[in-house]
């Protein structure tokens, strides 16, 4: 072992090095000092006792998915190396593509091809997912079971162990013993993924699995498990969800009630329909038919058990708050019979007495979104009471992708881009040709009108992510710097030119990325 005399000699050397050999000559001169330091270093190391050997980690699990082609792996390394900054907003200057915006697109494309993360890039991938929560679902699915294995070895990556998108290798849903073992012993991320997989195979088996441990789960975990039942929600889930209405967690009770109301034939939906129909009726006493509303006067215990929140948010009246909750939880099909056999389009067009139209239409919007009712969504989108862009965006999600894109393209043609940002965000990527053409045309009109280019930076950034790469040739003519006219913002022409150049180069890079990922598959 190292003696106290050796320690003292070492300390003297350190003091001499710090103060200088002229002030503390032990030993004198610089070369003898370094020689003595080398000698004492060897002596100190020789005196150290070996520590107990650490238990090596278990081997990393296999991942049968292939790695991406070599060009795609090089591209991924480039994207991960440029991940330090936050995603761009589209308001930057220059013509170079924003690589931070392209990383999630690359990951999504790699997953569609069925690739797994290269082993050498797992660490950088987990670092990127740690820094950006928007990357986590795709990054962890790409990392797979090996990513989870690696995350257990570094506390900085513990977020992966609680994620609901773990990418773990799961047992076959029909392997009952292995499923039960992983359900009882697995990490939370693995259990959520397992529940989702079992639900996709057999919804009833998923609920049965959840019921085996439900009473012992933590409240936050019960909420997450319950939320995962949205996938493949069926009438067979009703008994379990009815039981969850008595859960000790208010959030769990509320989510259970929401899920039950999405099942039009459920008992809860029937109870809510009965309550809602006592509040809403058809008034034929005047020259024109109209809807009459009598909001609830109380929120009793039965209503609260069925998920109605008794206390309204600040600024909301109690009666309107209760009415909205009843209507949004009632099956939309009841209103045709209640309101004179009218179709959703004719119902939405009816005037509403006493200023209740905004509250009633907003509740119908929430019901259409919850029940994913295409006919009601279409009627509400074109109706007079749906003024909120947020409501329109949610309703659009219930329409088929092609119809959604055409609706937004027509909206842009009639209203421009200033109000379209939320609507564009719900359209499938890449944008369909009519939608992409409408966006480019509207940007060109804004440029030619001398508009402030910074006002459209968000849409330009969205176009870089969502416009079909095939649109790149159409942008060439827009890259020229337009002449500045009276009323044009100073320097706007240069900005527009850079923005269109950047958009074009980004689309070309996205096309190259797609070709790199498909390279070997084309040869198979």
Image: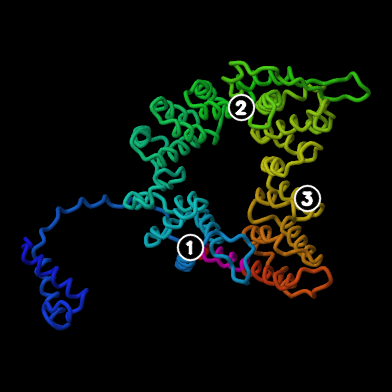
The residue at the point 46 percent across, 61 percent down is 68
Does residue 227 appear in this view? yes
The answer, for residue 520, to whether it is visible in the render is no
Verify whether residue 447 appears in magenta: no
Q: Which residues are magenta?
A: 506-517
Q: Is residue 145 left or right of residue 79?
A: left
> How far from the left and from the top, in percent, is residue 169?
39, 46
| Residue 26, image quadrant | bottom left
Number of callouts: 3
Residue beneath label 1, please?
84
Residue 383, image x and y in percent? 80, 37
Instruction: Estimate how packed mark 1 is, as few (under 14), some (14 to 19) or many (20 or more) residues with alpha carbons within 10 Å.
Output: few
**Residue at the disc numbered 2:** 263
Pick the front one: 254 or 2: 2
CA–CA distance in space, label 2 to label 1: 45 Å
Q: Residues within 10 Å of mark 3 (few under 14, many from 20)?
A: some
Q: Which is in the foreground here, disc 2 or disc 1? A: 1
Question: Quadrant of the rendered structure where residue 87 is?
Answer: bottom right
Q: Residue furthest right?
A: 287
Q: Which residue is mark 3?
A: 411
């Amino acid at each position: 072992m190292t003696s106290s005399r050796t320690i003292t000699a070492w300390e003297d050397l350190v003091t001499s090095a710090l103060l200088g050999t002229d002030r503390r000559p032990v030993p004198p001169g610089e070369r003898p000092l370094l020689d003595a330091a080398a000698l004492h270093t060897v002596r100190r190391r020789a005196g150290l006792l070996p520590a107990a050997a650490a238990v090596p980690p278990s081997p990393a699990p296999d991942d049968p998915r292939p790695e991406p082609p070599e060009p795609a792996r090089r591209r991924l390394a480039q994207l991960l190396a440029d991940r330090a900054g936050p995603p761009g907003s589209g308001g930057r200057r220059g013509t170079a593509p924003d690589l931070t915006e392209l990383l999630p697109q690359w990951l999504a494309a790699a997953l569609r091809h069925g690739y797994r993360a290269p082993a050498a890039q797992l660490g950088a991938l987990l670092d990127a997912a740690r820094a950006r929560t928007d990357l986590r679902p795709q990054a962890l699915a790409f990392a797979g079971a090996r990513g989870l294995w690696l995350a257990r070895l570094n506390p900085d990556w513990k977020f992966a162990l609680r994620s609901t998108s773990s990418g773990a290798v799961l047992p076959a849903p029909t392997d009952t013993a292995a499923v039960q073992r992983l359900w009882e012993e697995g990490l939370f991320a693995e259990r959520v993924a397992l529940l989702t997989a079992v639900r996709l195979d057999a919804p009833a088996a998923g609920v049965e699995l959840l019921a085996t441990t439900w009473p012992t789960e933590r409240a936050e975990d019960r909420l997450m498990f319950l939320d995962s039942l949205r996938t493949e929600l069926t009438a067979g889930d009703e008994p379990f969800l009815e039981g969850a209405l008595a859960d000790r967690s208010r959030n769990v009770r509320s989510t259970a009630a929401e899920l039950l109301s999405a099942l039009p034939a459920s008992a809860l939906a029937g109870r809510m329909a009965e309550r809602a129909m006592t509040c809403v009726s058809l008034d034929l006493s005047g020259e024109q038919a109209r809807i009459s509303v009598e909001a609830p006067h109380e929120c009793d215990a039965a209503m609260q058990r069925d998920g109605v929140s008794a206390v309204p948010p600040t600024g909301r009246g109690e009666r309107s708050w209760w009415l909205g909750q009843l209507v949004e939880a009632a099956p939309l099909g009841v209103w045709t019979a209640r309101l004179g056999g009218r179709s959703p389009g004719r119902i939405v067009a009816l005037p509403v007495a006493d200023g209740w139209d905004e509250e009633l239409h907003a509740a119908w919007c929430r019901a259409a979104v919850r029940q994913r009712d295409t006919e009601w969504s279409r009627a509400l989108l074109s109706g007079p009471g749906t003024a909120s862009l947020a409501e329109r965006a949610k309703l659009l999600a219930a329409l088929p992708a092609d119809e959604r894109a055409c609706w937004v393209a027509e909206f842009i043609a009639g209203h421009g881009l200033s109000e379209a940002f939320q609507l564009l965000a719900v359209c499938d990527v890449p944008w369909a040709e009519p939608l992409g053409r409408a966006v480019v045309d509207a940007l060109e009109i804004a440029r030619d009108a001398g508009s402030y280019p910074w006002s459209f930076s968000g849409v330009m950034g969205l176009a870089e992510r969502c416009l079909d790469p095939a649109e790149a040739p159409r942008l060439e003519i827009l890259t020229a710097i337009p002449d500045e006219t009276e009323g044009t913002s100073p320097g706007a022409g240069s900005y527009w030119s850079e923005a269109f150049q950047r958009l074009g180069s980004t689309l070309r890079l996205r096309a190259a990325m797609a070709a790199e990922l498909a390279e070997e598959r084309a040869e198979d």
